[in-house]
Amino acid sequence: MRLLLTNDDGINSPGLLLLAAALRAMGHKVFVLAPQSDRSGVSHSITFLNGPNRITRIDEDTWSCDGTPVDCVVIALMGGLPESAPLDAIVSGINRGANLGTDIVYSGTAAAARQGALCNIPSLALSLLQGDEWYWDMATAFTAERFAEMLAFWKPGCFVNVNIPGQKETPRGLVHAYPSLRYYNDSIETYYAPDGHRYCFAKAGKISAKPEKGSDWEAVAESNASISDILIHPALLGRYDVGKQVRME
């Protein structure tokens, strides 16, 4: 297959580089176009509408972009990387940290997969939860082993979202789950500076969620990887039946 690989952690992320190597070792033709720096939390932001993006060649079939993950997908699909056309699928990740449930609203990793699905291309977002350390080798090996199964889960009108538990052992299974509700409990701290301006700093809170039956949170809490089909836009809500393919007219 001809694959575009991107992420929101940046071109030097271990999850991106190890996955690219693994997919190439499987015989896939992999083109990498990823942000030159960390773009976590940018959601579906597109920057090149306000000016050009600079593409820098890093290695063979590997480039960085000074834009966002969605910029990377749009540029590749619109001919910015003529070497990559046509593409069979888009893979975003492996992300540093969870993209469970509500996280996908904010995630640049999820947005890249959403953009691919909007163009009716099978698209997959992959994330690794934080554990005692970052188990990149485990996550990469698991993804390579189950890659065909993950992509086969895709259907028009959705992208596929996978979360891998942060543990040394291979996940017990790959469990179909619905997105959970996550509560961030964030706050801000405000300071008045000598320059007369007010500065607000984000203070991250402890994320809480209920491991409800059938949720992605429950799946990873039980040492499984979760796999979810995520609708790409609200217009499909009334036309979607779980387990049935969406018909795009």
Image (cartoon, rainbow, N blue to C red):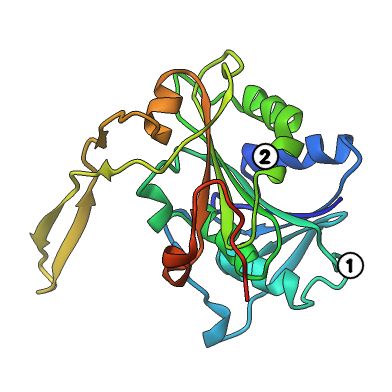
* Residue that appears at 38% across and 32% down: 217
Residue highlighted by disc 1: 83
Q: CA distance from mark 2 to mark 1?
A: 26 Å
Q: Nearer the viewer, mark 2 or mark 1?
A: 2
Q: Earlier in the sequence, mark 2 or mark 1?
A: 1
Q: Nearer the viewer, residue 144 or 54?
A: 144
Near-viewer residue (228 or 136): 228
Q: Is residue 94 visible?
A: yes
Most distant residue in the bottom direction: 50
Q: Are marks 2 and 1 in contact (CB under 8 Å)?
A: no
Provide residue 113's location: percent of width, then percent of height. Answer: 59, 57
Amino acid type, mark 1: Glu
Q: Quadrant of residue 141?
A: top right
Left or right of 221? Residue 94 is right
To which residue does mark 2 refer?
150
Q: Is residue 88 above or below residue 160?
A: below
For label 2, count other residues whose C-alpha is less than 10 Å away and answer few (under 14), some (14-19) or many (20+): many
